[in-house]
Image: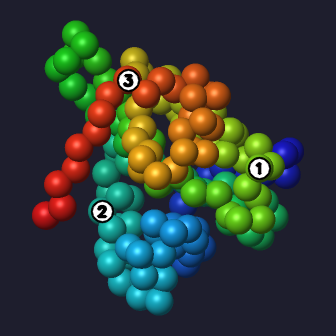
Amino acid sequence: MSDLEIRPATTGDLPDIVAMLADDPLGAQRESPDDLTPYTAAFQRLAHDPHQHLVVAVRGPMVVGTLQLTVIPGLSRRGSTRSIIEGVRIHAQERGSGLGTRLIEWAVEESRRQGCQLVQLTSDTTRTDAHRFYERLGFEATHLGFKMAL
């Protein structure tokens, strides 16, 4: 893994990021790799927010992983800052290689560096392999999440 670089994403990475987001049964239903317009607009919002960290893992010229880390100051837990890990995706050719672990370790370390006291994430209830992966890394399933589509 010494040839792996984790770096901030650029607009040039968007086609690869969106392709990874779409490359699973859930993503195939909600992502549109053929039209990058909404992703470009979202990228601009992320790029201008210092609390957002969209990163890619690159091996040589190839983007092989991505995640978004959001840092959130708050009042609960005695004014603690927390982070949320979202949109974790690993290129199909890299799954099982340890890359996911490296990306999550990066996110946890960056959360510490940002002064966070807690790092959290959600995972779709159907992603049972992902649940085992996160538990293996020390995450605990302590809450039940709720969403409302708007």
Residue placed under numbered mark 3 in the picture: 142
| Identity of the residue furthest to the left in this view | 150
Identify which residue is drawn at 62% across, 37% down: 133
Q: Quadrant of residue 70?
A: top left
| Identity of the residue furthest to the right in this view | 2
Label 3: how many residues lie within 10 Å, few (<14), some (14-19) or many (20+)? Answer: few
Above or below, comparing residue 22 to residue 70 in the picture: below
Who comes first in sequence, dot 3 or dot 2? 2
Q: Amino acid at mark 2?
A: Arg
Q: Is residue 5 left or right of residue 127?
A: right
Q: Position of residue 87 (x, y in %)?
A: 47, 54
Q: Which mark is residue 96?
A: 1
Q: In the rendered image, which quarter contains the C terminus? A: bottom left
Q: Amino acid at mark 3?
A: Thr
Residue placed under numbered mark 2 in the picture: 45
Who comes first in sequence, dot 2 or dot 1? 2
The answer to whether the residue labelled 3 contacts the one labelled 2, judged by CB atoms less than 8 Å apart, is: no
Identify which residue is drawn at 76% across, 43% down: 98
Q: Position of residue 55 (x, y in %)?
A: 55, 53
Which of the two marks, 2 or 1, is nearer to us in this view?
Answer: 1
Which of the two marks, 3 or 2, is nearer to us in this view?
Answer: 3
Label 2: how many residues lie within 10 Å, few (<14), some (14-19) or many (20+)? Answer: few
Who comes first in sequence, dot 1 or dot 3? 1
Q: Position of residue 73 (x, y in %)?
A: 26, 29
Q: Is residue 36 left or right of residue 92?
A: left
Q: Quadrant of residue 58?
A: bottom right
Q: Amino acid at mark 1?
A: Gly
Q: Is residue 147 visible?
A: yes
Q: Could you tell me which secondary element the residue under label 2 belongs to?
A: helix
- Marks 3/2: CA–CA distance: 31 Å
Above or below, comparing residue 72 to residue 60 in the picture: above
Identify which residue is drawn at 54% across, 45% down: 128
